[in-house]
Amino acid sequence: MIENINKEQLFIKPEDSLLIALKRMDELDNKLLIVMNGDRFQGLLSIGDIQRYFIKHQSFEVAAQVAMRKNIRVASVDDSFDYIKSMMLEYRIEFMPVIDQHGSLSKIIFWEELFGKETRSKSQPISLPVVIMAGGQGTRLRPITHVIPKPLVPIGELPIIRIIMDNFVDDGCHEFFISVNYKSEMIKSYFGSLDDSPYRISFFEEDRPMGTAGSLSLIKDRINSTFFVSNCDIIIQEDYTEIYKYHKESSNEMTAVAFVKEVVIPYGTFEMGKNGLLDSLAEKPRYTFLVNAGLYILEPHLLAEIPEDELFHITHLMEKIISRSGKVGVFPINEGSWLDIGQWQEYQKTLKRFGSEINL
């Protein structure tokens, strides 16, 4: 958490790449860094700056100083404490650099120092329907899913599906459509037992597995606005309003969220040319991929394009849209914003991640 961060860990150099910045954000579990040129303050780099640059230029290899915004909010040593506090509250600022008359960083004021554990809630909440695909058998989490369905697998004191839903509620989304099949009565019973629930829930049930999108055909007459679709085994710690804003501004029919994954080959590799001759070689090459995170935004007319009563995956829908020259956008997030419980190894990592935030 941010209160345990050595302040200098927030510093990156102007020439550091966006990929380096993303890794630092993952290490610190925060989404804002300070760009320092020696001992002089140069600017701020946010996850939003990186996302906007990548969407436009498709590269994480450029220097931080290329992607950072020119217009940023910082405080002066001459600003009063009350003014700084009010500005941080108005704009929900993670931390505020205080700059002296020589352009040097005097100090950093963190949100937690002023407001404690109060959540930095969004100033412009959205209100969209959310579909959660919760009908799978969770075979990779056996034997626990022999007993309880995957959506009710606990992360601390809450089941995974509640954490997913609460993240949406934080952004103003309260209407949920939950697709169920395996141990469906247990899921319905759990939600039926909640008091003062912030959720408005409608269940719809597959009579057999229909893929990652097939069951959406069952609600094609019940959703008439832009909506989210989420897997039930992932947590996305991201500003959903920014994903929605990108989706609308780009006039996408569908937007898929993807996390940035760097893969390092721990060996030297060869590229062969004609007749088996060595063309080029690379020592421990690095490759960057955009990995499907399991969260999507869809326009409602797409529901009519999902075939009824057959197996159909969300990737089939993407291919169908692209085949008719429709628009499918991709919104990148850093890998640390994506948490998975779909298999035991990732589930254990998620438990450790939440260990500092939830009583385990």
Image (cartoon, helix red, strand yellow):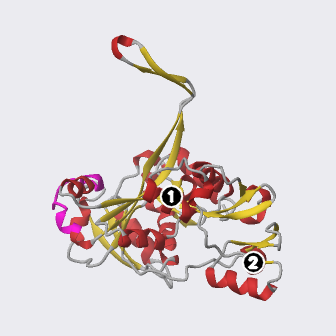
Front in this rendered view, residue 70 or 220: 70
Q: Point out the stretch of residues depicted in magenta.
A: 302-316
Q: Would you place residue 117 above or below residue 196 in this image? A: above
Residue at point 40% right, 67% down? 187
Q: Quarter-wise, where is residue 334 in the image? A: bottom right
Q: CA distance from mark 1 to mark 2?
A: 28 Å
Residue at point 83% right, 78% down? 77
Front in this rendered view, residue 315 or 350: 315
Residue 309 in picture, x, y percent from top left: 16, 59
Residue density around tag 1, few if under 14, some if 14–19, many if 20 or more, within 10 Å = many
Q: Which residue is mark 1?
A: 333
The furthest residue to the front: 102
Question: Where does the N terminus fall, quadrant-wise?
Answer: bottom right
Residue type pointed to by label 1:
Ile
> Under tag 2, what secondary structure?
strand
Q: Earlier in the sequence, mark 1 or mark 2?
A: 2
Residue 73 is marked as none
Residue 31 magenta: no
Residue density around tag 2, few if under 14, some if 14–19, many if 20 or more, within 10 Å = many
Q: Is residue 3 left or right of residue 171?
A: right
Q: Taking the image as drawn, is residue 252 in sight?
A: yes
Residue type pointed to by label 2:
Ala
Question: Where does the C terminus fall, quadrant-wise?
Answer: bottom right
Q: Would you place residue 26 above or below residue 271 in this image? A: below
Residue at point 25% right, 72% down? 300
Residue 82 in picture, x, y percent from top left: 78, 88
Residue 75 is marked as 2
Front in this rendered view, residue 134 or 146: 134
Residue at point 78% right, 73% down? 98
> Under tag 1, what secondary structure?
strand
